[in-house]
Amino acid sequence: MYQTSIDDFLEIEEFQQDLISWFLRVQRELPWRQNPTPYQVWVSEIMLQQTRVDTVIPYYDRFMQKYPNPEALAAAEEEDVLKTWEGLGYYSRARNLQTAVREVVSEYNGKVPDNAKELGQLKGVGPYTKGAILSIAYQQPEPAVDGNVMRVISRIRKVEEDIAKPKARKIIEGIVSDMISAEDPSSFNQGLMELGALICKPKNPLCDECPVQAHCRAYKEDLQEMLPIKSRKKSQRTEKYVALLIRDENHRILVQKRPEKGLLANLWQFPMIPMDKANTTDELVQWFGDQYGITIDVHKHLTDIKHVFSHIIWNLDVYSATSTGGCLQEGKGEFLSAEELQQLPFPVSHQKIARLI
C-alpha cells in the first residue's frame, strides 16, 4: 500500500539531498550535537522523550557535568541521580538509564554497544533510542522514529493509519529504512526530527518554508491539516488528596519515601491523605493517627496544587500541621531538617510544597 521504491513522485535521492542540506544549514545549536559520543546521544534522547528541547538543555548540561561518562553514572547513588533529574519528570527514565549504563560498564567495558541486538537489550532502550544512537553516534542507517518523525512521514507519504497504533509505527519505520541516507544517516534522521519540530508542526504546519514540500503527498492533496490520523487518549482520572506540611517540636518536617515500584518510585514526598479520608478535620486527624501512629493539630490552608500526569491528575489541598504526640510507625517516614530536605529528590508537585517551608 505504501510504495517504498523510487517512483515518479518521490525521488529518494533528491529527498535526501533536500532534507540534509536544509538540516545542515538551519540546525539548532544544541549541546548534545557538539561532537556527540554514544553516551551523550543516549542521555539526550532519554531526556527528550516527552519533554521539550528548551526544558532539557539545562538538565542535560547539569547531568553531563556531574556524570560525564558511563563510569560516573554507573557509580552514582540512585538517589543522587534522581536529585539531578528532579523536575524533569518521568523518573523511570533516569532509573532505567542508570540500570542500563551499569550493564554497559560491567558487560561492555563502558563502551555503548554499536549493534542493534545488544543495544536493544539494554533496559529502557526502545526502537527509537536504539535507532538514534546507531545513526547519530555510529553513522549506521537505522530508522529513529519519534513523534515528530511519525508526523512528517505520515504527511510526506500520505500514511492514513492511526499513528497511535503499532501498525503505523511499523509502516513508518519501514518507509524511513528505505529512504534513509547511507552516506549521512545522522543528518537524515536529525533532519526529520528537526523538520517536525520547526516546520511540520502538529497544527498550522509551515508548508511554504518546507525544504521537502515538492515530495509531500499530503501537501499536494491539501491534506496536511488532516494528517497524521491519531485516536484520542483515554481521559485522565482525577485523584484528590490533602497534603500535610507537619513540623515537630524541633521544627523538623515529616517526609516519606515512595515505594520502589510504581508512580514516582523512590522519590520523597510530604504525607498525602486521600480526600475521602479527610471529609472533616477530625476525620483526617483520626485517620492519620491510625496510619502513622502520631497525633497532629491541623492549622491553616496553605495552597492548592494541581499536577497533571499522562494518565492521572493530582489535586492537592496543602495544610500546615504540627505533631503533638505518639510515636511514628516504622516505614511511615522521618522528620528531617530543612537543610536535609534539600538533598532529597521530590516530584514537581512536592517541590512546590517544599518552597512553602
Image (cartoon, rainbow, N blue to C red):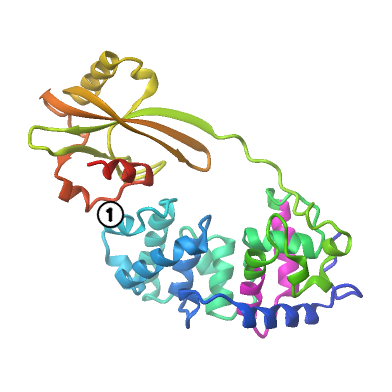
Q: Quadrant of residue 228?
A: bottom right
Asked if residue 357 is among those painted magenta in the image, a careful observer would answer: no
Q: Is residue 42 left or right of residue 75?
A: right
Specify the segment rendered in magenta.
Answer: 167-192
**Which quadrant: the C terminus?**
top left
The three-letter code of the residue at mark 1 reads: Glu
- Relative image position of residue 16 (x, y in whole percent): 74, 79
Q: Is residue 336 above or below residue 3?
A: above
**Seen from this angle, which residue lies furthest bottom?**
183
Q: Is residue 257 left or right of residue 229?
A: left
| Residue name at image x 64 percent, y 67 percent | 198
SS category of the residue bearing label 1:
helix
Q: Is residue 321 left or right of residue 81?
A: left
- Relative image position of residue 186 (x, y in whole percent): 60, 78
| Residue name at image x 66 percent, y 64 percent | 196
Nearer to us in this view, 349 or 230: 349
For the stretch drawn in magenta, what is the main secondary structure?
Answer: helix
Q: Quadrant of residue 210?
A: bottom right
Asked if residue 188 is among those painted magenta in the image, a careful observer would answer: yes
Nearer to us in this view, 12 or 318: 318
| Residue name at image x 50 percent, y 65 percent | 45
- Relative image position of residue 59 (x, y in whole percent): 39, 63
Q: Is residue 78 above or below residue 241?
A: below
Q: Number of numbered discs present?
A: 1
Nearer to us in this view, 350 or 150: 350
**Seen from this angle, which residue lies furthest left?**
250
Q: Is residue 273 visible?
A: yes
Q: Which residue is mark 1?
A: 79
| Residue name at image x 58 percent, y 63 percent | 128
Q: Is residue 121 visible?
A: no
Instruction: Tell me if mark 1 has few (under 14), some (14-19) or many (20+) residues whose alpha carbon lies within 10 angstroms of its own.
Output: some
